[in-house]
């Protein structure tokens, strides 16, 4: 870190606009050491891409540290004494590598292919139409709480086999668990994460028992068959179901909110979408690039590596800043401009390589349907309050709320 620049991802200024600090990071040669996290930050598109595509970069320390060393690091990061969080959250499909990751991903991958996801289009459209119908008579809504928060969880819940009436509670559990992934790991936040993980685990255990007694065509039933075949154990079953439900909530809600905010901030681009509705697929990709909902991940190197002209020893921890990489002007012309027709747009919001986002097709379909429906049904939409506040932290990016005034077409 240079004397003139301090990276402050927990500050209110960063929450409102992280891109100034990202630009300052990209201007510093090589990677930047962030002492608070004992991590080397990669902020440029080229460096982030190199790290996430390198097979020597892994998500866990299992291959580079002893159990004693891992335990010591858990304590230092306040990730210890959380029995259910450690079993089902700290270990997951996302936080596994090699054969374990490949085996677990294979059990759920087929239901998230473009062909399978597109079969949900009519069901999603019907659900979105009904939700908009219930809100259309109001002159103002909170787009985040009243609309965005109700779609992704219900859809991923239906894929997995969760009753509709349970989905609002799953969102609460998910948000309270995920909040502990960020830098602020106070005892209160720790207790909240562990208690909600326990409640989520107990719920999934009951739901699994119901599916064992009465199987269906859902993903949960398929995972039960995979467990019976010895392809996953009990902890892996719960962890994978929990991850899919958590991933299907927060990040899509966040990018729906930031995507709508971008359309409101750039009314010429909203009008362009009204005039050219065929641009919606590229517009959705631009929403992910412009405000990446999961802007930060990490990797460890399992052997000595060279990144950005410097050699790093085995075990070095790297922070990959997707949010910064997706605003890198070396990769994206006029990177700070929101352009619904941007082509090509090889953003990195879904990651790259082995950990490429499993649910990206479903998230993009949700957004395509929601924004197409809104532009078709409402002739005017605008912010009804001041500048919306964004969530604080390094690992998430999305508005806390988004007051929206609209007029039906």
Image (cartoon, rainbow, N blue to C red):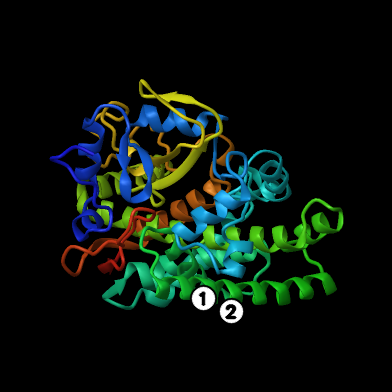
Label 1 – label 2 distance at C-alpha: 7 Å
Q: Is residue 344 visible?
A: no
Determine which residue is flagged by label 1.
168
Tell whether label 2 touches label 1 (CB within 8 Å): yes
**In the current view of this chain or complex, which residue is farthest to the top?**
309
Q: Is residue 395 above or below residue 208?
A: above
Q: Nearer the viewer, residue 199 or 374?
A: 199
Few, some or many C-alpha atoms within 10 Å of disc 1 (few <14, some 14-19, many ≥20)? some
Q: Is residue 277 above or below residue 128?
A: above
Q: Which mark is residue 306?
A: none
Q: Which mark is residue 165?
A: 2
x then y, percent, for residue 31: 32, 32
x then y, percent, for residue 368: 45, 51
Q: Residue at x 29, y 37 (%)?
A: 327
Q: Nearer the viewer, residue 161 or 95?
A: 95
Q: Residue at x 27, y 44 (%)?
A: 272
Q: In the rendered view of the protein, which quadrant contains the N terminus?
A: top left
Few, some or many C-alpha atoms within 10 Å of disc 2 (few <14, some 14-19, many ≥20)? few
Q: Nearer the viewer, residue 96 or 345?
A: 96
Q: Is residue 401 above or below residue 70?
A: below
Considering the numbered disc 1 on the image, is that residue within a helix, a strand or a loop? helix
Residue 141: quarter of image: bottom left
């Amino acid at each position: 870190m240079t004397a003139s620049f301090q990276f402050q991802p927990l500050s209110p200024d960063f929450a409102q606009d992280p891109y100034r600090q990202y630009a300052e990071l990209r201007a510093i040669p090589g990677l930047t050491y962030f002492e608070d996290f004992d991590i080397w930050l990669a902020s440029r598109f080229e460096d982030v891409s190199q790290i996430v595509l390198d097979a020597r970069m892994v998500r866990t320390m299992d291959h580079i540290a002893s159990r004693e060393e891992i335990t010591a690091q858990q304590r230092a990061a306040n990730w210890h004494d959380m029995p259910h969080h450690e079993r089902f959250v700290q270990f997951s499909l996302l936080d596994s590598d090699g054969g374990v990751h490949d085996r677990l991903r294979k059990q759920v991958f087929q239901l998230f292919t473009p062909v399978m996801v597109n079969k949900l289009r009519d069901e999603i459209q019907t659900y979105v139409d009904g939700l908009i119908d219930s809100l259309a008579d109001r002159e103002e809504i909170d787009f985040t709480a009243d609309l965005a928060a109700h779609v992704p969880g219900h859809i991923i819940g239906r894929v997995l086999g969760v009753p509709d009436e349970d989905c609002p509670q799953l969102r609460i559990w998910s948000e309270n668990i995920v909040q502990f992934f960020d830098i602020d790991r106070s005892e209160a936040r720790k207790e909240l994460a562990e208690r909600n993980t326990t409640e989520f685990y107990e719920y999934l255990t009951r739901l699994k028992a119901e599916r064992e007694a009465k199987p269906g065509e859902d993903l949960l039933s398929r995972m039960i068959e995979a467990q019976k075949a010895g392809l996953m154990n009990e902890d892996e079953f719960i962890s994978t179901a929990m991850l899919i439900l958590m991933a299907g909530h927060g990040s899509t809600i966040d990018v729906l909110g930031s995507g709508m905010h971008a359309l409101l901030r750039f009314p010429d681009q909203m009008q362009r979408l009204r005039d050219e509705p065929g641009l919606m697929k590229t517009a959705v990709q631009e929403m992910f690039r412009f405000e990446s909902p999961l802007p930060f991940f990490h990797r460890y190197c399992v052997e000595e590596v060279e990144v950005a002209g410097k050699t790093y020893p085995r075990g070095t921890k790297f922070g990959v800043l997707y949010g910064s990489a997706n605003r890198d002007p070396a990769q994206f012309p006029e990177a700070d401009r929101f352009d619904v027709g941007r082509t090509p747009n090889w953003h990195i919001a879904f990651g790259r390589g082995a950990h490429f986002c499993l649910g990206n097709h479903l998230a993009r379909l949700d957004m395509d349907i929601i924004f197409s429906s809104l532009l078709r049904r409402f002739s005017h939409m605008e912010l009804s309050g001041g500048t919306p506040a964004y969530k604080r932290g390094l690992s998430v990016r999305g508005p806390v709320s988004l007051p929206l005034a609209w007029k039906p077409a």
